[in-house]
Amino acid sequence: MSEMLVTVKAKGAERWKLGHPWIYRSDVVEAPPDPGVVRVADRRGKFLGQALYSPRSEIRLRLLSRDDTPIDAAWWGRRIGAALARRGTVAASAYRVVHAEGDGLPALVVDRYGPFVVAQLLSAGLERVRDAVVAGIEAALAPEGILLRNDATIRRHEGLPLEVTPARGTVPETVEVEEDGIHYLAAPHRGQKTGAFLDQRENRALAGAHTRPGGRGLDLFTYHGSFALHLARRAAEVTAVDSSGDALARGRENAALNSLTNIVWREANAFDYLRDLERREEQFDTIVLDPPAFAKTKDSVPRALAGYKEINLRAMSILAPGGVLLTCSCSYHVNRGVFAEMLGAAAQDSGRRLQVLAWVGAGRDHPELVTAPETGYLKGALLQAID
Ligand SMILES: C[S@@+](CC[C@H](N)C(=O)[O-])C[C@H]1O[C@@H](n2cnc3c(N)ncnc32)[C@H](O)[C@@H]1O
């Protein structure tokens, strides 16, 4: 067990009791200067558990375990192996094995891309035990290579450098992924997140299943064509729009990989593009809206909501009668209720009657903790125009 001890106030101890894994700076009484795995006790000396400690972050402690079993490579291996077992069978060769707090392994992301692993260590405490974590990944998953995508900006709050470093073997520049019969190239070194948006896997299959055969599809914020590929299997033609030329170049390769020749790629600002489509009174049978997080902070929520409403209103306006719109937000600060309200307001302004076919979230390999709302971020709706 770790020798470092952190003492916390009753309020901090209460948070763990209520099932939240974080204890904030204001609830820490005494702590060592360095990050790492620590023992945590209350002011009376009662042992509460072991945690990752970050001396520079507002989130000082992240609960690892309530018992005193040594947290070594074997412990990480067991915990990662248990997370893998919980995944059961996922119908894709790339998926998330460890979703940080959602899997009881705070600040740790482990994504599997076929025989390779891309991981993220997102707190100072975790960074300190990097070797044990990497050994645990190796023991649980036996990958051919492990890449650390430690360039997520959240590491800045921890005083950690942003870097991409190989940890074991070699992970190639692109890895071919199979997802529900579609093939695409993930880019572990340079792509967004760990190389692909794995969290939308189930929603891509859902959108594909609701695509009108022979109709027109529109995938806004397409990245490397992820939704567009699923739509293109049934639609006559699909327009895929993104502002990133790099991502679109991979999108074209992905279309070729699937022998799909009915996708038109457009490098554009989706806001402008939608405005043009509306002005030209174009119509689409299947539309996907998967924008980046517009609300990065609590203060930016009103502005973000205006942006979400604008794109949703326009998308609703160009939806063909009976058409289907899959619309998402990955802003943690915009919760499900607020998102639903925004959709209602957009629908009212559009004058369309839209029914909800499904409320959706991140795939089941990105689990939320019911006792920690911060672990959820992606929400969406599958809507159908009644007339
Ligand atoms: C959440 S990701 C989309 C993920 C994708 N749908 C998938 O499933 O892989 C958001 C995408 O929006 C793009 N983007 C950001 N701002 C944009 C804008 N104003 N217009 C068009 N694309 C934008 C980014 O390049 C990024 O690829």
Image (cartoon, grey):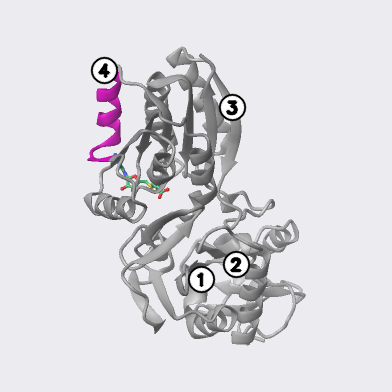
Residue denoted by label 2: 62
Q: Quadrant of ligand 1?
A: top left
Q: Nearer the viewer, residue 339 or 64?
A: 339
In the displayed structure, would residue 104 be above or below residue 345?
below
Amino acid type assigned to the residue bearing label 3 in the image: Val
How far apart in space, not on screen, are marks 1 and 2 (Cα)?
9 Å
Residue denoted by label 4: 279
How far apart in space, not on screen, are marks 3 and 1 (Cα)?
43 Å
Residue denoted by label 3: 356
How far apart in space, not on screen, are marks 3 and 2 (Cα)?
37 Å
Amino acid type assigned to the residue bearing label 1 in the image: Ser
How far apart in space, not on screen, are marks 2 and 4 (Cα)?
51 Å
Secondary element at image label 3: strand
Give the image quarter of residue 253.
bottom left
In this view, the mark in front (3 or 1) = 3
Residue at left offset 61%, top offset 55%: 367
